[in-house]
Image (cartoon, grey):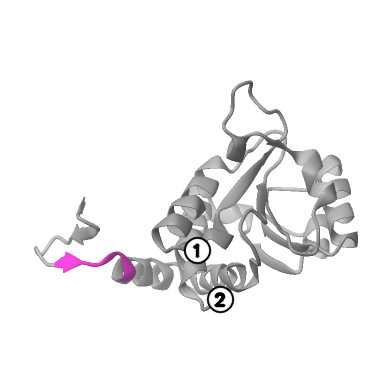
Amino acid sequence: MCLKDGYRSAENGSMETPRNGMRRLIRSLGPIGQESRRFGHALGRGCRGAGQLMIVGTPTYEPWHFTAHVAEEAERRNRPELAPTLMRWSVPEGAPPHLATPVDAIARASRTATVLAVVDGDDPGLLERISDATRRGARVMTIAGGEGELTSLAHEQLVIDAWRGEQVHDACQHIVSATAPDVDR
């Protein structure tokens, strides 16, 4: 399949809209695809104001690819409240503002903020910051690789077991970023 003007050309020569392709992807993943769609809708309903969506990973994994997809969809669908800020464990010198916010800012997240952690396990430093954000009233969401203390702090969670593999994890993240803007504000 090749992408042309927002449509994919299928093997039979017909054109498939991105929306139909997303529906097909959701169906192909079965229950985890449906759960990813539900999580995406929860994300879209819960973001309250521009600049209030914080996405964070761990010191060894920054979800920059996922963050970029969320940012693209937010801009394309005119949903400024979904424009994310990537929280960084180590901010490179000269990074643009939306990529230059240290993870310590999570601890100061207010009740208007949504903190979305994309993690594969518990990190003590992240747990501490998320606990602080929760106490301040921030909404916490997780895309996690399994059970743990972080998932118990989350208001909404999408658990993608590690055994499913990286391709399924990536597909679920694409579903979340594509379906978040679908819901009414």
Q: Which quadrant holds the N terminus?
A: bottom left
Instruction: Check disc 1 and report the residue beneath it.
Output: 79
Position of 98 relative to 1 (above/below): above
Q: Secondary structure at mark 2?
A: loop
Residue 107 magenta-highlighted: no
Q: Residues within 10 Å of mark 1 (few under 14, many from 20)?
A: some
Write the residue at 69% across / 59% down.
Answer: 142
Q: Nearer the viewer, residue 8 or 33?
A: 8
Write the residue at 58% across / 61% down.
Answer: 81
Does label 1 or label 2 sit earlier along the sequence? 1
| Residue 116: percent from left, percent from top | 68, 56
Q: Amino acid at mark 2?
A: Arg
Instruction: Check disc 2 and report the residue beneath it.
Output: 185
Q: Amino acid at mark 1?
A: Arg
Q: Are marks 1 and 2 in contact (CB under 8 Å)?
A: yes
Magenta range: 15-19
